[in-house]
Image (cartoon, rainbow, N blue to C red):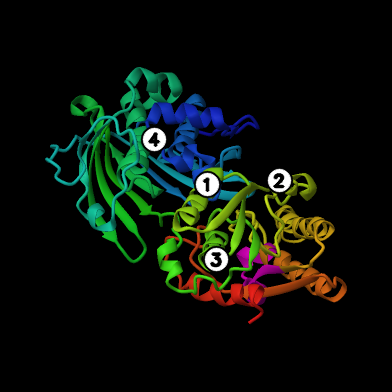
Amino acid sequence: MSILLLASQTRIFDWKAQDDFAFFSGDRNPWHMDAIAARRTQAGYPVVHGMHAVLWALEVLARDEALRQSVARVNVVFHRFIHVGDEVAIKIVRQDTAGIRLQLWVDGLKVTSLKLIFGEAKLARTQESVSGIVHQLSSPEEPAVLSLEQLNEAGGRLTFARGLDVAANFFPELAAAIGPRRVAGLACMSRLVGMVCPGLHSIFSGFNVNTVDLSAQPDAICFQVTGVDERVRFINQSVEGGGWSGTIDCFARVAPVVQAPMKQIGSLIGKNEFEHASALIVGGSRGLGELTAKLIAAGGGAVTITYAVGRAEAVDVQRQIREWGGKCEILQYDATKPAEEQLSHLEFFPASLYYFATPFVARRKSGLHTQSVLNDFLSVYVSGFHNLLKQLSRMSDNGLTVFYPSSVAVEECPAEMIEYAMAKAAGEVLCANIARFSKDLRVVVERLPRMLTDQTAVVFPIETAEPLNVMLPIIRRVEIGR
C-alpha cells in the first residue's frame, strides 16, 4: 500500500481557515484569533490550531484511501507553532499494514508528528464520575484562567461545540472513514485545552488516544488532570469521550508580563527627580518602554509613548500615568516607515529619546543564518533608528540625548538568536559613529541583561534581572548625567 503525495497536498492556513475551525471546534483562544493578543505570547504571531492541522492531514489520508483499515490509536506531538498564513506540507515517513507515520513541515522545519496504528477499537470504559473545579461545561464563552494549584484539581465534562453534521461537513472524507463523532471529539480536545484546561494561557503539546466503541460514547469529552509539574508548567490529563480514550499533554503558558504600577514606582524615586525631562519613548506601550515611561513620569517628567499596533495598551499606560498625576501623550509610530509624517503629530518636542522598537525576537528558522530574519531586525534596529534620528535632528535646535538598548546577546551570540545579535551589534556601530560625528546628539548605549518581558517569558524557568533595578540607573544617566 502506498500514497502518492501530490504538490496539491499542501495547504495555507489563512484567516478564513482559522475562523472556520474556531467556529467548528469552539476554540477561540485569543492567541489563535487576536493578532494583538498573540504578540504578547511566546509565539509572537497568531497560531494555527494544532488540531486543525492534524484533522486536515487525516482528511488528506482519508481522501487518498489510506484509512481503509480501522484506526486503533493516534499519537501526535506538536513540535513548533504554525502561524496563520503558513504553507504546511505533508511528508509520509513510513507506511505499512501496521500503520502510518507522517510529519507536517513549514519552511523546512518539522512542526508536527503523527503516528497512526491500525487495529480494532477497544470497548469503551465505564465512565467514572469526574470531580474538580471545572465540572460540566457546554459552551464556554471566554477561556478559563486557572492557577497551577487550580489545574491540579481540574476535571469535568465538555460538550461538543457543534453537531455531528458540522463535523461531516468540515472533514467529509475523514468523517466517512472514522465517524463524525470521532472527528468532533478531536476538535473538542482543542477546545478543552484552549478554552478550559489550561485555558487562556495554554500550549497544546501532544496527545495519545485510542479509539473506543462508539455505541455508548457521548458527544462530549470527559477529562481529569492527572499530573502537574509546576517546575516547567506541564499538565497531563486523561480524556474519554467522542470515540476516544487516552491522554493529553499541554503546558500552562506564562501570562503576559505586567509592569510595576505607578504607586510602586513612585516610591523608588524623588517626585521631582526628572522634572526637566521631556522624553519620546518609542515602543512605550508595554515592556521596558512602558516601565521607562512610568519611571520618568513618576519623577515629574513629561513623556510621549509610541505604539505600532497596540493602541489599547498605550491608552492604558497613559491612563495609569495620568491618574497618578503624571504627564503622558501617545503617538502611533512604525519604525519601519518614514519618520517625518509620523512625527508631525508630536505634542511637544523631546529632549531625550528611548528607542525600544523591536520585531518579535524568537524566530522560527531552519539554519544557522536566515537573511530575511536579519533584514527584519536591521530594518528596525539600524535603518529605522537612523531614520528617526535624522528627522529628530532636523526638528531640534537644542540637541538630543538618545538611549539605544543593545543586548548581552551580542557577547553571548546564542545560535537561535544570531541574526538578532548581528543587528544589535550593527546598531552599536551606528551609535558609535553618531557619537563621533554628530555634535548635537549624545548617545547612551547599554547591553541589557535578560529581563522578564513578553519577549522573554517562556515556560521553562530562566534567570532574569529585575527590570526596575536595570532601567532606573540608565534613565538617571540619560536625564541627569549621573
Locate residue 466, reporting x and y percent: 47, 73
**Disc 4 target residue:** 27
Give the alpha-carbon distance from disc 1 to disc 4, as whole Å: 29 Å
In x, y percent, where is residue 64?
A: 52, 26
Residue at numbered disc 1: 315
Which label lies toward us, 2 or 4? Answer: 2
First in sequence: mark 2 vs mark 3: 3
- Identity of the amino acid at label 3? Gly
Viewed as shown, does residue 239 lie left or right of 169?
Answer: left
- Pick whichever of labels 1 and 3 is earlier in the sequence: 3
How many residues crowd mark 2 within 10 Å: few (<14), some (14–19), many (20+)?
few
Q: Which residues are magenta?
A: 402-419
Residue 408 covered by magenta stretch:
yes
Q: Determine whether label 1 and label 3 are within 8 Å by CB.
A: no
Q: Residue at x 46, y 35 (%)?
A: 52
Numbered label attached to residue 345: 2
Q: What amino acid is labelled 2 in the image?
A: His
Name the outermost residue toward the right.
Answer: 437
Task: Decide if residue 435 is on the left or right side of residue 450.
Answer: right
- Mark 2 or mark 4: name the one nearer the start of the chain: 4
Q: Earlier in the sequence, mark 4 or mark 3?
A: 4
Q: Residue, x 44% and y 33% (percent of image)? A: 55
- Kindly give the residue lying farthest to the bottom in the view shown: 482
* Residue 266, quarter of picture: bottom left
Classify mark 1: residues with Cα within 10 Å, few (<14), some (14-19) or many (20+).
some
